[in-house]
Amino acid sequence: MTTATPQLDIHMFPCLEDNYGFLVHDPESGFTACIDTPEVEPILRALDEKGWQLTHILNTHHHFDHAGGNLELKEKTDCIIVGSRKDAKRLPGIDIQMGDGDTYLFGAHELTILETPGHTSGHVIYYFADSGIAFVGDTLFALGCGRLFEGTPEDMLQSLQKLQELPDTTLVYCAHEYTQDNARFALTVDPDNGDLRTRSTEIKKLRERGKPTIPTTIGLEKRTNPFMRTADAELQEAVGMSGAPEVEVFAEVRARKDRF
Ligand code: ZN
Ligand code: FE
Protein backbone atom coordinates (compact mmCIF):
# COMPACT_ATOMS: atom_id res chain seq x y z
CA MET A 1 0.00 0.00 0.00
CA THR A 2 1.30 3.41 -0.80
CA THR A 3 0.76 6.36 1.40
CA ALA A 4 0.12 9.61 -0.38
CA THR A 5 2.88 12.12 0.19
CA PRO A 6 1.38 15.31 1.55
CA GLN A 7 1.75 18.28 -0.75
CA LEU A 8 4.52 20.74 -0.17
CA ASP A 9 3.37 24.20 0.88
CA ILE A 10 4.82 27.01 -1.19
CA HIS A 11 4.86 30.58 0.10
CA MET A 12 5.93 33.34 -2.26
CA PHE A 13 6.64 36.98 -1.38
CA PRO A 14 8.40 39.98 -2.96
CA CYS A 15 12.03 40.88 -2.17
CA LEU A 16 14.22 43.77 -3.33
CA GLU A 17 13.02 45.52 -6.51
CA ASP A 18 11.59 42.67 -8.54
CA ASN A 19 12.83 39.42 -6.97
CA TYR A 20 10.59 36.79 -5.41
CA GLY A 21 11.41 34.94 -2.23
CA PHE A 22 10.05 31.42 -1.86
CA LEU A 23 9.60 29.16 1.13
CA VAL A 24 8.94 25.45 0.62
CA HIS A 25 7.52 23.63 3.61
CA ASP A 26 7.00 19.91 4.10
CA PRO A 27 4.31 19.56 6.79
CA GLU A 28 5.29 15.98 7.57
CA SER A 29 8.99 16.46 8.33
CA GLY A 30 8.79 20.14 9.20
CA PHE A 31 11.58 20.84 6.69
CA THR A 32 11.45 24.37 5.36
CA ALA A 33 13.67 25.66 2.59
CA CYS A 34 14.05 29.07 1.12
CA ILE A 35 14.99 29.22 -2.52
CA ASP A 36 17.89 31.69 -2.64
CA THR A 37 18.36 34.52 -0.19
CA PRO A 38 17.61 37.79 -2.00
CA GLU A 39 16.86 39.72 1.21
CA VAL A 40 17.05 38.57 4.82
CA GLU A 41 14.33 40.63 6.48
CA PRO A 42 11.36 39.60 4.29
CA ILE A 43 12.47 35.96 4.53
CA LEU A 44 12.57 36.09 8.34
CA ARG A 45 9.21 37.85 8.38
CA ALA A 46 7.67 35.21 6.09
CA LEU A 47 9.02 32.40 8.30
CA ASP A 48 7.57 34.12 11.32
CA GLU A 49 4.17 34.64 9.70
CA LYS A 50 3.98 30.99 8.70
CA GLY A 51 5.39 29.65 11.96
CA TRP A 52 8.00 27.67 10.03
CA GLN A 53 11.65 27.12 10.99
CA LEU A 54 14.23 27.43 8.27
CA THR A 55 16.12 24.16 7.76
CA HIS A 56 17.60 24.66 4.28
CA ILE A 57 18.70 27.25 1.76
CA LEU A 58 18.64 26.03 -1.85
CA ASN A 59 20.87 28.31 -3.95
CA THR A 60 20.30 28.52 -7.71
CA HIS A 61 23.39 30.66 -8.36
CA HIS A 62 25.88 33.00 -6.74
CA HIS A 63 24.55 36.45 -7.73
CA PHE A 64 24.03 38.82 -4.82
CA ASP A 65 20.24 38.92 -5.25
CA HIS A 66 20.25 35.10 -4.84
CA ALA A 67 22.97 34.31 -2.27
CA GLY A 68 23.50 37.68 -0.57
CA GLY A 69 21.57 36.68 2.56
CA ASN A 70 23.12 33.21 2.98
CA LEU A 71 25.47 33.87 5.88
CA GLU A 72 23.14 36.01 7.93
CA LEU A 73 20.30 33.50 7.60
CA LYS A 74 22.61 30.61 8.41
CA GLU A 75 23.84 32.38 11.50
CA LYS A 76 20.29 33.16 12.66
CA THR A 77 18.70 29.78 11.89
CA ASP A 78 21.53 27.23 11.68
CA CYS A 79 20.13 26.00 8.37
CA ILE A 80 21.93 23.81 5.82
CA ILE A 81 23.00 25.46 2.56
CA VAL A 82 22.70 23.42 -0.65
CA GLY A 83 24.18 24.47 -3.98
CA SER A 84 26.14 23.52 -7.06
CA ARG A 85 29.53 21.86 -6.62
CA LYS A 86 30.73 24.02 -9.51
CA ASP A 87 29.94 27.17 -7.53
CA ALA A 88 31.16 25.94 -4.13
CA LYS A 89 33.76 28.72 -4.00
CA ARG A 90 31.29 31.51 -4.56
CA LEU A 91 28.24 30.33 -2.61
CA PRO A 92 28.74 31.68 0.91
CA GLY A 93 28.39 29.04 3.64
CA ILE A 94 27.65 26.10 1.33
CA ASP A 95 27.34 22.78 3.21
CA ILE A 96 26.10 20.31 0.59
CA GLN A 97 27.53 20.33 -2.92
CA MET A 98 25.40 18.85 -5.69
CA GLY A 99 25.91 17.98 -9.36
CA ASP A 100 23.67 17.42 -12.36
CA GLY A 101 20.97 14.82 -11.67
CA ASP A 102 21.84 14.45 -7.99
CA THR A 103 18.95 13.96 -5.62
CA TYR A 104 18.38 15.02 -2.04
CA LEU A 105 15.68 13.80 0.33
CA PHE A 106 13.67 16.76 1.55
CA GLY A 107 11.61 14.93 4.16
CA ALA A 108 9.96 12.22 2.04
CA HIS A 109 10.15 14.38 -1.10
CA GLU A 110 12.86 13.65 -3.61
CA LEU A 111 14.51 16.83 -4.82
CA THR A 112 16.49 16.67 -8.08
CA ILE A 113 19.18 19.19 -8.99
CA LEU A 114 19.69 19.97 -12.67
CA GLU A 115 22.64 22.00 -13.94
CA THR A 116 21.45 24.78 -16.26
CA PRO A 117 24.50 26.84 -17.30
CA GLY A 118 24.02 30.00 -19.37
CA HIS A 119 23.11 32.87 -17.05
CA THR A 120 26.06 31.79 -14.88
CA SER A 121 28.34 28.78 -15.36
CA GLY A 122 27.22 27.17 -12.10
CA HIS A 123 23.47 27.82 -12.25
CA VAL A 124 21.24 24.96 -11.08
CA ILE A 125 17.50 24.48 -10.75
CA TYR A 126 15.58 22.49 -8.11
CA TYR A 127 12.89 20.05 -9.19
CA PHE A 128 10.41 18.30 -6.88
CA ALA A 129 9.12 15.56 -9.20
CA ASP A 130 6.45 14.21 -6.84
CA SER A 131 4.87 17.64 -6.47
CA GLY A 132 5.53 18.75 -10.06
CA ILE A 133 7.31 21.94 -8.98
CA ALA A 134 10.50 23.52 -10.33
CA PHE A 135 12.43 26.51 -8.97
CA VAL A 136 14.37 27.83 -11.93
CA GLY A 137 16.17 30.91 -10.59
CA ASP A 138 17.37 33.12 -13.44
CA THR A 139 17.48 30.39 -16.12
CA LEU A 140 13.88 30.53 -17.30
CA PHE A 141 11.53 33.46 -16.81
CA ALA A 142 7.87 33.70 -17.74
CA LEU A 143 8.20 34.58 -21.45
CA GLY A 144 11.96 35.07 -21.12
CA CYS A 145 15.29 33.64 -20.06
CA GLY A 146 18.28 34.91 -18.11
CA ARG A 147 20.96 37.08 -19.64
CA LEU A 148 24.06 35.23 -20.80
CA PHE A 149 26.66 36.49 -18.33
CA GLU A 150 28.83 33.37 -18.23
CA GLY A 151 27.56 31.10 -20.98
CA THR A 152 27.10 30.80 -24.72
CA PRO A 153 23.78 30.74 -26.56
CA GLU A 154 24.38 27.02 -26.99
CA ASP A 155 24.73 26.51 -23.21
CA MET A 156 21.47 28.34 -22.51
CA LEU A 157 19.59 26.65 -25.34
CA GLN A 158 20.61 23.25 -23.97
CA SER A 159 19.59 24.28 -20.46
CA LEU A 160 16.16 25.39 -21.68
CA GLN A 161 15.80 22.17 -23.68
CA LYS A 162 16.46 20.25 -20.47
CA LEU A 163 13.60 22.14 -18.82
CA GLN A 164 11.32 21.42 -21.78
CA GLU A 165 11.67 17.73 -21.00
CA LEU A 166 9.90 18.18 -17.66
CA PRO A 167 6.15 17.42 -17.73
CA ASP A 168 4.04 20.20 -19.27
CA THR A 169 2.06 20.55 -16.05
CA THR A 170 5.20 21.34 -13.98
CA LEU A 171 4.70 24.53 -12.01
CA VAL A 172 7.62 26.86 -12.65
CA TYR A 173 8.70 29.44 -10.09
CA CYS A 174 11.10 32.04 -11.57
CA ALA A 175 13.12 34.41 -9.43
CA HIS A 176 11.98 37.73 -10.93
CA GLU A 177 8.80 39.50 -11.99
CA TYR A 178 9.92 40.47 -15.49
CA THR A 179 6.92 39.09 -17.32
CA GLN A 180 5.28 42.25 -18.64
CA ASP A 181 8.50 43.52 -20.25
CA ASN A 182 9.17 40.03 -21.57
CA ALA A 183 5.70 39.93 -23.12
CA ARG A 184 6.28 43.22 -24.95
CA PHE A 185 9.49 41.83 -26.39
CA ALA A 186 8.04 38.40 -27.21
CA LEU A 187 5.37 40.00 -29.38
CA THR A 188 8.10 41.61 -31.53
CA VAL A 189 9.61 38.24 -32.51
CA ASP A 190 6.47 36.05 -32.43
CA PRO A 191 3.68 38.45 -33.44
CA ASP A 192 1.31 35.88 -34.95
CA ASN A 193 1.29 33.56 -31.94
CA GLY A 194 -2.33 33.62 -30.73
CA ASP A 195 -1.51 31.97 -27.40
CA LEU A 196 1.10 34.64 -26.76
CA ARG A 197 -1.32 37.46 -27.52
CA THR A 198 -3.94 36.01 -25.20
CA ARG A 199 -1.36 35.56 -22.49
CA SER A 200 -0.04 39.12 -22.90
CA THR A 201 -3.53 40.49 -22.28
CA GLU A 202 -3.89 38.35 -19.16
CA ILE A 203 -0.47 39.47 -17.89
CA LYS A 204 -1.37 43.11 -18.36
CA LYS A 205 -4.56 42.63 -16.32
CA LEU A 206 -2.69 40.82 -13.54
CA ARG A 207 -0.02 43.52 -13.30
CA GLU A 208 -2.60 46.30 -13.30
CA ARG A 209 -4.01 44.71 -10.16
CA GLY A 210 -0.50 44.28 -8.71
CA LYS A 211 -0.76 40.48 -8.93
CA PRO A 212 2.19 38.16 -9.65
CA THR A 213 2.42 36.35 -12.98
CA ILE A 214 4.32 33.50 -11.31
CA PRO A 215 4.12 30.50 -11.26
CA THR A 216 3.95 29.59 -14.90
CA THR A 217 4.08 26.06 -16.36
CA ILE A 218 6.43 24.28 -18.75
CA GLY A 219 3.55 23.70 -21.17
CA LEU A 220 2.60 27.39 -21.27
CA GLU A 221 6.22 28.45 -21.79
CA LYS A 222 6.63 25.93 -24.62
CA ARG A 223 3.68 27.55 -26.40
CA THR A 224 4.48 31.20 -25.75
CA ASN A 225 8.11 31.81 -24.66
CA PRO A 226 10.20 32.87 -27.69
CA PHE A 227 13.35 31.36 -26.13
CA MET A 228 11.61 27.96 -26.12
CA ARG A 229 10.27 28.42 -29.65
CA THR A 230 13.45 29.01 -31.63
CA ALA A 231 12.78 25.84 -33.68
CA ASP A 232 9.30 27.09 -34.63
CA ALA A 233 8.85 27.90 -38.35
CA GLU A 234 6.67 30.98 -37.75
CA LEU A 235 9.07 32.51 -35.24
CA GLN A 236 12.04 31.79 -37.52
CA GLU A 237 10.23 33.50 -40.37
CA ALA A 238 9.32 36.50 -38.21
CA VAL A 239 13.00 37.09 -37.35
CA GLY A 240 14.08 36.49 -40.96
CA MET A 241 15.94 33.24 -40.24
CA SER A 242 13.81 30.50 -41.78
CA GLY A 243 15.62 27.17 -41.71
CA ALA A 244 18.67 28.51 -39.84
CA PRO A 245 20.30 26.32 -37.16
CA GLU A 246 18.30 26.64 -33.95
CA VAL A 247 21.26 27.89 -31.92
CA GLU A 248 21.73 30.80 -34.36
CA VAL A 249 18.06 31.73 -34.09
CA PHE A 250 18.36 31.52 -30.31
CA ALA A 251 21.45 33.77 -30.31
CA GLU A 252 19.66 36.32 -32.50
CA VAL A 253 16.54 36.41 -30.30
CA ARG A 254 18.71 36.74 -27.16
CA ALA A 255 20.72 39.58 -28.78
CA ARG A 256 17.54 41.41 -29.76
CA LYS A 257 16.22 41.10 -26.22
CA ASP A 258 19.50 42.53 -24.85
CA ARG A 259 18.98 45.61 -27.05
CA PHE A 260 15.22 45.87 -26.43
ZN1 ZN B 1 21.21 36.22 -11.54
FE1 FE C 1 18.53 37.46 -10.26
Image (cartoon, helix red, strand yellow):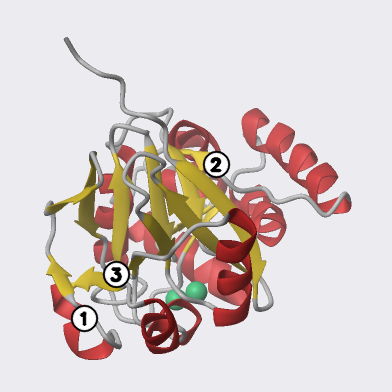
Quadrant location, the N terminus: top left
The verdict on label 3 being within 8 Å of ligand 1 is yes
Name the image quarter holding residue 118.
bottom left
Q: Secondary structure at mark 2?
A: strand
The residue lying furthest to the right in this view is: 208
Q: Which residue is mark 1?
A: 87
Whether tag 3 and tag 1 are in contact, CB under 8 A, the answer is: no
Residue visible at 42% across and 65% down in the picture: 54
* Residue 123 badge: 3
Whether tag 2 and tag 1 are in contact, CB under 8 A, the answer is: no
Q: Which residue is mark 2?
A: 216
Disc 2 crowd, CA 10 A, few/some/many (<14, 14-19, 20+): some
Left or right for 123, reference 148: left
CA gap between label 3 and label 2 equals 20 Å
Q: Secondary structure at mark 1?
A: helix
| Residue 238 x/y as whole percent | 56, 46
* Residue 102 badge: none
Q: Is 88 drawn above or below residue 183 in the view shown?
A: below
Q: Secondary structure at mark 3?
A: loop
Left or right for 8, reference 184: left
Q: Nearer the viewer, residue 96 or 152?
A: 96
